[in-house]
Amino acid sequence: MTKSALITGITGQDGSYLAELLLSKDYKVYGLRRRTSVPILENIEHIKDEIEFLDGDLLDAGSLINAVRISKPDEVYNLAAQSFVGTSWDQPVTTGMVTGIGTTNMLEAVRMAKPDAKFYQASSSEMFGKVVETPQKETTPFYPRSPYGVAKVYGHWITVNYRESFDMFACSGILFNHESPRRGVEFVTRKVTDAAARIKLGLQKELRMGNLDAKRDWGFAGDYVKAMHLMLQQDTPDDYVISTGEMHTVEELVEIAFGHVGLKWRDYVVVDPKFVRPAEVDLLLGDCTKAKTKLGWELEVGFEQLVTMMVESDLKKLGKGQEISSR
Ligand code: NDP
Ligand code: GDR
């Protein structure tokens, strides 16, 4: 029988890849979407006719109960969040409400309207924050360094709590940074690949950046959504770290992106204190042995391949834009 899934955050990077994956597996896909004055469906334009959209917001509990009642999902993927760490210092309360309390709203909706649905919570390596142990695994203590990280710790523990309190099949995926051509342009990878492409095409002169020494464990979003799905196919709910086990600096990212278009990054990159965070997460490196062993999860795309894929995509998008504007 066809399974059904409800995805919150369907318009985001991960929502789009997950929807593609589930549609390829013949799921009936419902997507929770909040109202915007103009529809922003860029990431899911190509599959929008195959998704049934339900109006709702993580802050509006009634809309979530309604969405669960209508969709009667076998699986719920809670991907919606205020997901940009930088913004979480400017809007700490909104971030706490959406990214933290929003998780409880979603869990309550499932508990009330479809308690046997399997639930996935989008937890984050930002919960590890300050280095306590490297590499970081499921048992590493959390020490978040941003309002976003703090909110995700709340989301993580409330998911564990609902699993233990109500015997719900609730899993938390502790995902390290994952990127793609569909990444929002304020995140560092896409900011860099977009700028490298713009500078190459003569559309931008310089790139203003924050901390170039930060180290991250960057993977490809298309690989990571497969792990989300695998977690909900197990017999028992559990929490898993998903990562590549490889770490690179922001400087290496810049070097590869600019190098790919034949430019020397030092000629264009300017460090601007505006982009340096009030508290930084210096390094993140994940140990995903548990996911590899128990889920059989495998990575396909490596770091260099990921960065060049993103630069190529940005060149193509901007190139098309140029063709259109020069007509
Ligand atoms: P995006 O920022 O691309 O997508 C976030 C989604 O959440 C968007 O669809 C957005 O909708 C939706 N959203 C925001 N606020 C609300 C709200 N109040 N009610 C309903 N929907 C809302 O994030 P990603 O796809 O990159 O990440 C998915 C999830 O995984 C997030 O929870 C993120 O925090 C988490 N995560 C991401 C990692 C990564 O590296 N990408 C790593 C670890 C965790 P709209 O289009 O309307 O803004
Ligand atoms: P992050 O991603 O905070 O790890 O959160 P982001 O790409 O924003 O930053 C990564 C690192 O790069 C440094 N950096 C800059 N970052 C941005 N955005 N812009 C800059 O100009 C810049 N210069 C240096 C940052 O200081 C940081 O160290 C992402 C999000 O997807 C979260 O939702 C998710 O939970 C975590 O990854 C895992």
Image (cartoon, grey):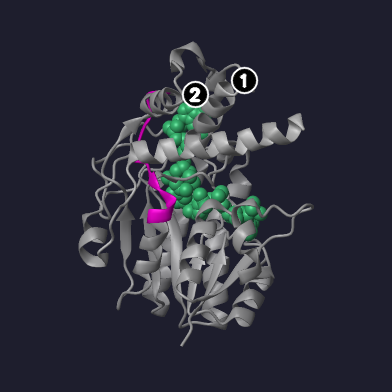
Q: Residues in magenta?
A: 212-223
Spatial CA distance of label 2 from label 1 is 23 Å
Q: Which residue is mark 1?
A: 202
Mark 2 C-beta to ligand 2 under 8 Å: yes
Specify the amino acid type for callout 1.
Gly
Q: Position of residue 294 (x, y in %)?
A: 23, 66
Q: Is residue 117 above or below residue 93?
A: below
Q: Callout 2: few (<14), some (14-19), or many (20+) C-alpha neighbours within 10 Å?
A: some
Q: Callout 1: few (<14), some (14-19), or many (20+) C-alpha neighbours within 10 Å?
A: few
Report the disc number at residue 283: none
Q: Secondary structure at mark 1?
A: loop
Indicate yes or no whether the magenta region holds residue 217.
Answer: yes
Specify the amino acid type for callout 2.
Gly
Dots 2 and 1: beta carbons under 8 Å?
Answer: no
Q: Is residue 241 above or below residue 104?
A: above
Q: Which residue is mark 2?
A: 210
Quarter of the figure that contains the C terminus: top right
In the drawing, does residue 90 fall left or right of residue 243?
right
Q: Position of residue 102 (x, y in %)?
A: 57, 61
